[in-house]
Image (spheres, rainbow, N blue to C red):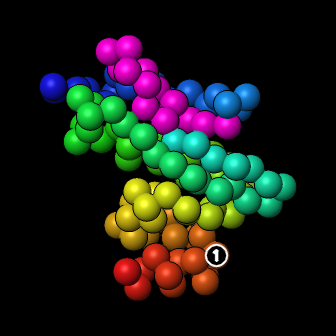
């Protein structure tokens, strides 16, 4: 399936504590727990028919941009988010030095 990411709109569902998007009636999401000074990114989920289209990356960027805008430290429990952070140094400042060292050493 060819997908234009510009058409994918990610919304922040605060009640469900997740960032989400629906494409072809399939829900993709990244869940989190929020604390006063940080956001724990727990799980990223994209249905199989939508995988490899950049949706997980768009969800992750949205969550990281939200963290930056709200001055929150990011705790990446989700393996996808950790892998994304490893490849995108522009977000390294959002992660504690200790967590960043763990991410980069993998």
Mark 1: give few (<14), some (14-19) or many (20+) Cα within 10 Å. Answer: few
Instruction: Identify whether 34 is placed above or below 45.
Output: below
Q: Which quarter of the figure has residue 94?
A: bottom right
Q: Nearer the viewer, residue 71 or 86?
A: 86
Mark 1, residue position = 96
Farthest residue to the left: give it: 1
Q: Which quarter of the figure has residue 83?
A: bottom left
Residue at (65% x, 52% y) in the render: 67
Instruction: Identify whether 21 is placed above or below 35.
Output: above
Quarter in which the N terminus is drawn: top left
Instruction: Identify whether 3 is placed above or below 36.
Output: above
Whether residue 58 is visible to the viewer of this picture, yes or no, is no
Residue 56 in percent (x, y) is at 38, 43
Where does the magenta region start and end? 17-29
Residue 9 in percent (x, y) is at 45, 25
Residue at (37% x, 80% y) in the render: 106
């Amino acid at each position: 399936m060819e997908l234009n990411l510009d058409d994918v709109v990610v919304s922040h569902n605060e009640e469900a504590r997740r960032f989400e998007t629906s494409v072809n009636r399939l829900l993709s999401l990244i869940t989190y727990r929020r604390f006063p000074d940080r956001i724990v990114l727990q799980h990223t989920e994209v249905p199989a028919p939508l995988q490899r289209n950049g949706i997980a990356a768009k969800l992750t960027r949205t969550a990281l941009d939200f963290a930056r805008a709200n001055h929150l430290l990011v705790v990446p429990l989700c393996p996808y988010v950790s892998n994304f952070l490893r490849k995108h140094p522009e977000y390294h400042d959002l992660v504690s030095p200790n967590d960043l060292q763990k991410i980069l050493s993998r």
